[in-house]
Image: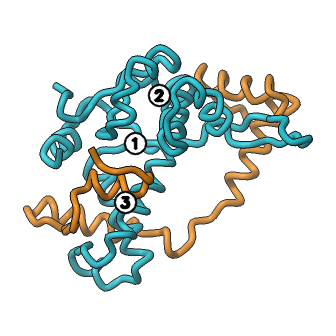
Chain colours: A cyan, B orange
Amino acid sequence: MYHAARSFLSKQQPRKIVSALSFAELSAVLARVRPEIQLSEPAQNEPFKRRIRAAVGYIFKDGGLTLASHVGVSTIHVGGRTAPIPMEYPKAASEAYRLRLKALDLLHLAYASLISRLEFKLDLFVTADQDILDAASEIEESLGLKTTHPKDIP
Amino acid sequence: MPVRLDDEELKRIDLLVQQKHYKSRNEAIRKMLKSKLSETLSEDEDVHELVEILLKLKKKGKDPLVLKFGKTAVETVAEGRGKRPT
């Protein structure tokens, strides 16, 4: 997996689009492995918060990742209240019955679906998450997204 | 001052107007611009210089970021998603 991910990230093409959720998830992963992050000087001497941010920034730049921007809000009516919320949430909720994945997985897919429709046309949703890969055909049918493991990218 | 927008951007703005988040294209653009201009990057988030230094080190053949996970990266991500790695 490590080599597959490394090889995928080192390629210039195809263009790699990352959602705001992946940005947050990467920050969370790096923060949880705190003692094991070693950055070169002078970054290593920075406060922890800045070290995490610098590591994320470096991974994005080095891996040629493009952060997708916020795609908008939807108005929903629930519990007697009408509220504008980020579009990803109602999209994730509306696919829950069909895909039956965990909330974070649904949100990743909802982000990808909206990004593909509104910002960058996506050819593939790349993941090593087995639950998502197992639901590949349902995901393609309901969201029009092809999912693949990084090792299967030519 | 005229502003040029491409079809994709206009499509997104029209979608927001259609969903009644804004009354018109004009209001949408004005409010989004206002919101964007009021954002500032906190000192903690402004790590541009640090990232540039790390990238220069990489170009020199060094590995400026070393992650020593006790578990694999897949396991660590899976843990954060509340599931067991496969």
Q: Quadrant of the C terminus of chain B?
A: top left
Amino acid type of the residue that numbered disc 1 sits on in the rendered structure: Thr
**Disc 2 to disc 1, how far (Cα)?**
10 Å
**Disc 1 to disc 3, how far (Cα)?**
11 Å
Amino acid type of the residue that numbered disc 2 sits on in the rendered structure: Phe
According to the picture, the residue beneath numbered tag 2 turns out to be A120
Q: Which of marks 1 and 3 is nearer the N terminus?
A: 3
Amino acid type of the residue that numbered disc 3 sits on in the rendered structure: Gly
Question: Closer to the camera, B38 or A31?
Answer: A31
Q: Mark 2 lies on which chain?
A: A
Question: Closer to the camera, B29 or A107?
Answer: A107
x, y percent for residue B22: 84, 34
Query: Up-down: is B1 above or below A146?
Result: below
Q: Which chain carries label 1?
A: A
Residue B65 at least partly seen: no
Residue located 24% across and 74% down the image: A36
**Residue farthest to the left, as pictured:** B61
Query: Helix, strand, or loop for circle 3?
Result: helix
Residue A106 got which mark?
Answer: none
Marks 1 and 2: in contact by CB < 8 Å? yes
Query: Helix, strand, or loop for circle 2?
Result: loop
According to the picture, the residue beneath numbered tag 3 turns out to be A57
Q: Residues within 10 Å of mark 1 (few under 14, many from 20)?
A: few
Residue located 44% across and 52% down the image: B81
According to the picture, the residue beneath numbered tag 1 turns out to be A66
